[in-house]
Image (spheres, rainbow, N blue to C red):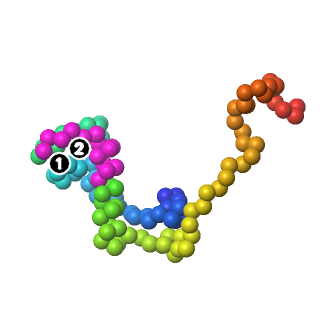
Amino acid sequence: MLEYKAAKHGRTFTRVDRAFPSSQVCLACGFRDGPKPLHVRQWECGECGTAHDRDHNAARNILVEGRRIVAAGRAETQNASWSAGKTRTKVPAQRGEAGSPRKGQTTQPGIPGL
């Protein structure tokens, strides 16, 4: 699903290896602290002492690894041909959208049309 959405919006999709140790590497200094049990949600780097939230650190490491893969020219570019020459255009909102009534308009309780 991410791949198709990236193509739809003209973005580059990069797949990071499943074995990439995203939650084990310190984002600040790059020290690999080793595997941790899943109940450990926060940890401190043994090298630089930086405190990390496990999920936030892993997400940032995946982003950095993805950018490194793109910079190395190894990104999957299947979506490049789909989005070539397409630009994102703004689409106006529909008139009569659902929403709260404006001031001064009354509403009737119940289901309309019944």
Residue identified by numbered label 2: 36
Residue type, numbered disc 1: Asp
Task: Tell whether position 103 is magenta.
Answer: no
* Residue 56 in magenta stretch: yes
Residue 91 in the image: x percent, y percent? 65, 56
Q: Closer to the camera: disc 1 or disc 2?
A: 1
Q: Is residue 49 left or right of residue 98?
A: left
Q: Is residue 66 left or right of residue 111?
A: left
Residue at point 34% right, 56% down?
Answer: 63
Q: Nearer the viewer, residue 72 or 39?
A: 72
Q: Position of residue 88 (x, y in %)?
A: 57, 62
Would you place residue 81 above or below residue 48 in this image?
below
Query: Which residue in the structure is indicated by mark 1?
Result: 33
The magenta segment? 48-61
How far across and how far down the image is residue 113, in percent? 87, 34
Image quarter in which the C terminus is found = top right
> Does the image show residue 111?
yes
Residue placed at 80% from the left, 25% from the top? 106
Q: Is residue 78 left or right of residue 43?
A: right
Q: Quadrant of residue 98?
A: top right
Q: Check disc 1 and report its element: helix, strand or loop.
A: loop
**What residue is shown at x 34% (from left), y 49% (from top)?**
59
Q: Which mark is residue 111?
A: none
x and y, in percent, of residue 31 in the image: 16, 52
Q: Secondary structure at mark 2?
A: loop
Q: Residue furthest left?
A: 47
